[in-house]
Image: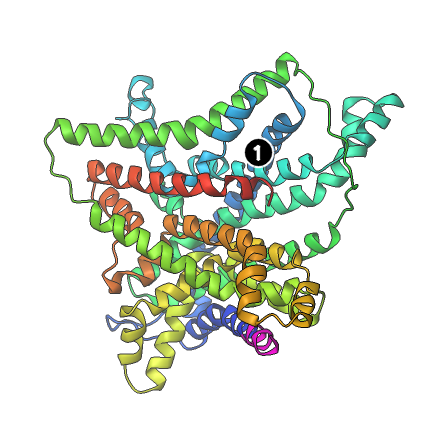
Amino acid sequence: MVTGRRALKVGALVVLALAVVPLVGVAIAVLDPAPDPFGGAAPSLGSVLAAPRTLDLVVNSLLLSVGVAAGALGVGGWLAWAEQRLDYPGRRLLGTLGLLPLAIPSYLVAATAASALGPAGFIGAPLGLPRASGLAMALGVLVVVTAPYVQLVVGAALARTSAAEEEAARTLGAGPGRRFRVAVLPRLRPALAFAGLISLLYAISDFGAVAVLDVPVLTWRLYEAVRTQSLARAGVYGLLLVVLTLPLFGLSRWMRGAGETRQVANPRPPTRRRPGPVALAATLLGHAVVIGVGVALPLATMGGWVADGVRRGLPFASPWGPLGDTALAAALGALLTLALAIGPAWVAGRGRSRLGAAVEQGVYLTSALPGVLLAFGLVQVALSLSRALGGGALYQALLGSGALLGLGYGLRFVAEVFGPLRSAVIGFDPRLWESARVLGAPRLRFAARVALPALGPGVAAGLLIGFIAILKELPVTLLLGSATGLRTLAFRVWDRYNEALLHDAGLSGLLLVGLAAAALAFTLRWRRHA
C-alpha cells in the first residue's frame, strides 16, 4: 500500500509538471520564433502587439467573454431558481430538456442558427433577415450553450440551501427582494461566482462558434496563424490568451477559497410557490430560448440538411468510419484522462497539504487554457525537443502516433475527470484499510472488494464526463489529430460545413449529438449534484 501511495504521488507530480508544458511552448514561440516557412521575415513581438487588429482581437475576446458570463448568469440563474422555488406546469420536463444543449457542440449550434436565421434559412427567408454572423450573434449562441452549466451549478446550490432563514425573514416582514438579498444570496454567491467563471472561460476559449460566425477573436486568429504556419504570430496571440486567462484562473482560486459556506445537517425544503404572470412569462421565455436555440433549432436544421440531400439524390459519405473513430478516440482519451487524474485526486483528496494544493491548482490550470492554445503549446515543445535532438523524427513520431493528441485530450479535460474522483477519495474512509490489514486481508482482495466498490461511482462518473467532453472537442482534434489519420465526427462536421456539403455535415452532426446525448443520460444524475 505504501508503494501504491508513492506511485500516486509520483503520478500527481507528473501531472503538475505537464501542466506547465503548454505555457513553456508559448514562451518558446515568443522568445525563439521559428523562421517563416515561405522565406519572409518573421513578425516581431512589438509589431504584432502594435497592430490595430491585435487590440481589436483582445477587445472582442473580452467583450464576448464578459457578455456571455453576464447573460448565462441571468438566464441560467433564473431557470435554476424557477426549477427549485417555483411550481408551474411542465417544470420537471422543461428543466431536463433545458440541459440538453450540454450534448450539442457550440459550433453546431452556431452553424445551424446561422443557416436557419440567414437570408436562405427557413426562418430568415420569410422575415427577410440579413446574414446571421458577428459578435452579437456569437454572444447569443454562447449564452444559450453555457446557460445550462449555470442552471446545474446554481440549482444544486439552491437544492442544498435550507428555507429556514427565508421563512424567518418572511415572518419578520421582509419583502421578496430583501429576503433574497439577506437569506439566499450570501449562500448562493460561491455558486454564482463559480458558474459565471465557467461561462467566462468557456467563451474566452471557444473556437468553433466564433469561427463559424466570423468573429475576430484571439482563439480563432491563433488557429489561423498555426494553420498558415505563421508560428511567430501564433506565439504572440498565444501569449495574449495566457495574459487574459491566467488572471481569471487566479480569480477562480480566490473565489473558491473565500466562498466556503456551511450547510445545515437537515435543511428544510422550501415551499414551491405559484409564479405570477411576469415570473411565469420570464420562465417560459427562458426555457423557450434555451431549448429552442440550443436543441430544437440544431436538430431541425440538421434534419433538414439531411432530408434535402436525400431529396436531391446527393451522395452521402459513409459515417461509420468517423463514428468508430469518434467512439475510439473518446474512449481511449477518457481512459488516459482518468489515468492522469487518479494521482492528483488521491493527493488532493487525502487532506490539506502543500503538495495537494499545488497539484489541484495545476489540474485546474490546464483546463482553464483554451484548447487551441494548449495544442499549440504542445506542438511547440515537441518541435523544440525534436530540433534539439537533431531532426524532425521525434516530432513526426509524437504527432503521427497520436501521443500528442492523447496528451492534449488528457490535459484539456483532466479537471473534469478530477472533480468526481476527488469527491470519491474524500468520501473514502482510510480506516477500512487499517481494518483489512489487521484482519490479514491481501491487498488485491481489499482493492477488489472494498476500494473499487467505494470509488467506483466516482470513477464511472469521471469516465463518462471525459467521454462526453472529448466527443465534442474540435481544436485539439484539428491541430493534433490530422497526422494520425483519425477522422472524428467533429472533424467531419467541420470539414463538410466549410465545404458547403451540408447534407453530410447534418448526418455527422446528428450522429455526434446522438452519441453525446446517450452518454449525457448516464451522467445527468451526477451533473445535477456535482
Tag 1 secondary structure: helix
- As drawn, is 193 to the left or to the right of 144? right
x 59%, y 77%: residue = 6
Please say whether residue 355 is visible from this viewpoint.
Answer: yes
Q: Viewer-proximal residue, 451 or 233?
A: 451
Q: Position of residue 246 (x, y in %)?
A: 58, 60
Scheme by which the image is coloured: rainbow
Q: Viewer-proximal residue, 326 or 169?
A: 326
x 63%, y 72%: residue = 440
- The amino acid sitting under disc 1 is Gly
Give above or below for 65 relative to 299: below
Q: Local crowd at mark 1 within 10 Å, few (<14), some, or many (≥20)?
A: many
State yes or no: residue 92 in magenta.
Answer: no
Write down the region rendered in magenta: 1-10
Give above or below for 225 relative to 164: below
x 25%, y 54%: residue = 487
Q: How many marks?
A: 1
* Residue position for label 1: 76
Quadrant location, the C terminus: top right
Most common secondary structure along the magenta stretch: helix
Give above or below for 445 relative to 31: above
Q: Residue furthest front?
A: 439
Q: Position of residue 431 (x, y in %)?
A: 71, 64
Q: Position of residue 438 (x, y in %)?
A: 69, 71
